[in-house]
Image (cartoon, rainbow, N blue to C red):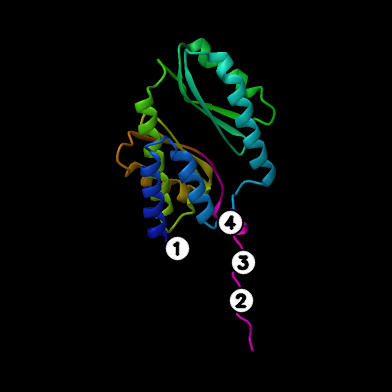
Amino acid sequence: MTRSVLAKTVLGLALAASLSGCFEMVVGSAVVGAVATADRRTFGAQTEDKAIAVKADLKLPKLIGEDGHVNANSYNRKVLLTGEVKDAAMKAAVEREVRAIEGVQSVVNELEIAGPSSYTSRSSDALITSKVKVSLVDMKTISANSFKVVTERGVVYLMGRVTEREGQIGADVARGVSGVQKVVKVFEYMTEDELKALQPAAVQPQNG
């Protein structure tokens, strides 16, 4: 399947899924299943990221109640906090709670002091995330599977383990998506040599 066909297929699935609010499930499974690129995190880091996210999902609702809406996304043990909280004290309390989770190495606190976002706003953010993922898949000079996309109130946050070149291309791609208000890079940068070391060696033709 070509990238162009894949991109159109994923976008079609995402738009269809928007009727039932299943953007992330559809896009995530389609992209991960179709893009044959290994995750640049170690298996241990991937496992810890999942555990961190689960623990945050269990802890934070008890802390914020109905006064906020917080998303915690972990990539290579770096946690990005987005959403809304009622005041500065709650913003600080959420960060402390997440920092205390086993395995967390750093926290990027992008929480806004405001009322919880509406369902319409969250649905719009999910669609933007879908479009950005599709656009990354269609970009031939980078690996879409190396990017984690989070959208909050039209602001796109890009996470991942990438080179500065890849990060700039990814940010430029995201800025070109309709509805995106701003792009924030939350990358872990690696060198081009480190990237080459992760890539499988080309198969050499045998003389015969």
Q: Quadrant of residue 171?
A: top left
How far across and down, in percent of the image, does residue 201 sit?
A: 62, 66
Q: Which amino acid does label 4 sit on?
A: Asp
- Dot 1: what SS? loop
Q: Crowdedness of circle 3 by 10 Å Cα count: few (<14), some, many (20+)?
A: few
Kindly identify which numbered label has been placed on residue 201.
Answer: 3
| Residue 22 at x, y percent in the picture | 45, 38
Q: Nearer the viewer, residue 99 or 12?
A: 12
Question: Nearer the viewer's eye, disc 3 or disc 1?
Answer: 1
Dot placed on the residue nearer the N-terminal end, 2 or 4? 4
Observer-side mark, 4 or 1, equals: 1
Q: What stretch is highlighted in magenta?
A: 187-208
Q: Name the residue under label 4.
A: 193
Residue that label 1 marks: 1
In magenta segment, residue 202: yes
Q: What residue type is labelled 3?
A: Ala
The residues bearing labels 2 and 4 have C-alpha atoms spaced at a distance of: 21 Å
Amino acid type, callout 1: Met
Counting from the top left corner in percent of width and height, residue 8 is at 36, 54
Q: Which residue lies furthest to the bottom in this view?
A: 208
Crowd class of label 4 (few under 14; some 14 to 19; many from 20; radius 10 Å): few
Q: Do the residues labelled 3 and 2 touch (CB within 8 Å)?
A: no
For the residues labelled 2 and 1, the Cα–Cα distance comes to: 25 Å
Disc nearer the start of the sequence (3/4) = 4
How many labels were placed on the picture?
4
Q: According to the image, label 2 marks what residue?
A: 204
Distance from disc 3 to disc 2, alpha carbons, whole Å, reads 9 Å
Sequence order check: which comes first, mark 2 or mark 1? 1
Closer-to-camera residue (164/138): 138
The local secondary structure at tag 2 comes to loop
